[in-house]
Image: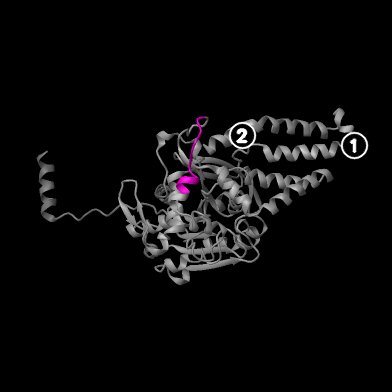
Amino acid sequence: MLYQIYETQRAFIEPFAGFAQVASKAYSSPGSVWSSSPLSQRMAAGLDLVYRLSKDYEKPEFGINAVSVGDSEVAIQQRVEIARPFCDLIRFKRFSDDPDTLEDMKSQPTVLIVAPLSGHYATLLRDTVKTMLQDHKVYITDWKNARLVPLSEGNFSLDDYVNYVQDFIRHLQGKYGNCHVMSVCQPTVPVLAAVSLMASRGEPTPWTMTMMGGPIDARKSPTAVNNLAMNKSYGWFENNVIYRVPDSFPGAGRRVYPGFLQHSGFVAMNPDRHARSHFDYFKDLMKGDDASTEAHRKFYDEYNAVLDMDAPYYLDTIRVVFQDFNLVNGTWDVKSPSGVSERVRPQDIRTTALLSVEGELDDISGSGQTEAVHALCTGVNPRNQRHFEAKGAGHYGIFSGRRWRDMVYPQVHSFIAAHTPAPKAAVPATKAVAAPAAPVAPAAKKKAAAKRAAR
């Protein structure tokens, strides 16, 4: 019922948002009759803020059209490599006319970035992808809004998430021989499960795993996010935050955790900061500070665009990660696509190097939660394990912005490079030499001569 009320309210406000946008442009346009008013700039700024606060935010685009590789600028084409009901595997294909650049790109390692499915779209990692493309072939999981997935596609659970990740890893292994896996925030847990299961079966595992700001062990330094999940019962979440998608969407009737609830929770964590940010935006509009206003728009276009999560997946995550702590307790069983339950055993991982990254000021995944992965992966040689704490970085700072580019990325880049095997040298082709004829026995020679004489 709450979802239906929210959608009704949004539909009611939408025309007013459109009116505010048009009116703002009318007051700010130099040729408009209203622009001559002494209050025109203030009215334009106020109406623009009303529009920003009331508009519906759709899924953003990655918008990565080119990056620098070495000294060259290369073009980027985004395309779907694998399409699944709840997720697309996206490839960022790089193109160049320079032979040396092409040769360099061919030898660069392949990285699968597993984006979080926690309310925002994968485009939240735009800066992560753009930076990684300088030195790597990059793929990313693009999770879909559950309200757009028809009920006929079935449900999506945490087990399905783990199985998706395994399939994507196998795909890249088949294409490139092997790959590296990088998980940001929420996916650290299912990615560790996916690689653990592959190791237990004796399958090849990725060369490296990079775990960034995730709740491997949510008991350590619990944050406000952790406390909410830990202090409410499983039944409370099922009865209070799960709603059915309204009839106006393709996924009508699907049980989901709505994105607008997740967004409200994020805003409620720092209401003063968001209020101050919007007021600063209003003042920047008044001053004509285009750089600051554009930066504000870009951030909130991303931050305010949210997606719904399928109820089984959301509830599984609450139970497995934040209440029963199945991963760290060694009691997590994952069901394969064939229906077989398998125990997650991180200690079986041996050939995958491990890097963990935390932000000193992370208020989403507390200190030590990600570093806990090293205590679980006892089969990995300590020489192939590394932990890095980004000083002064919050949660978003470890994968986006200046601290990501200047502090974290050099660590990730060097770690991946250090654990990427050198390509095997091609064996030079040799000219074929005819084998010497086998010696013929004397008796055979006489017999052959007799036959020739008979002819």
- Quarter where residue 38 is shown: top right
Q: Nearer the viewer, mark 2 or mark 1?
A: 2
**Which percent across, then down, holds residue 347?**
38, 65
Residue with the mark numbered 2: 9
**Which percent across, then down, holds residue 27?**
82, 33
Please, what secondary structure does the residue beneath circle 1 have? loop
221 shown above or below 159: below
Is residue 131 a member of the stretch shown in magenta? no
Magenta stretch bounds:
237-247
Residue 178 visible to the viewer: no
Residue 279 visible to the viewer: yes
Residue in the picture at 14% in, 55% down: 441
Say which quadrant the C terminus sits in: top left
Disc 1 residue crowd, few under 14, some 14–19, many 20+, Cα 10 Å: few
- Dot label at residue 38: 1
218 shown above or below 289: below
**Which percent across, then down, holds residue 39?**
87, 37
Q: Is residue 223 left or right of residue 328?
A: right
Residue in the picture at 42% in, 66% down: 377
Please, what secondary structure does the residue beneath circle 2 have? helix
Cα separation between marks 2 and 1: 34 Å
Q: Nearer the viewer, residue 398 or 236?
A: 236
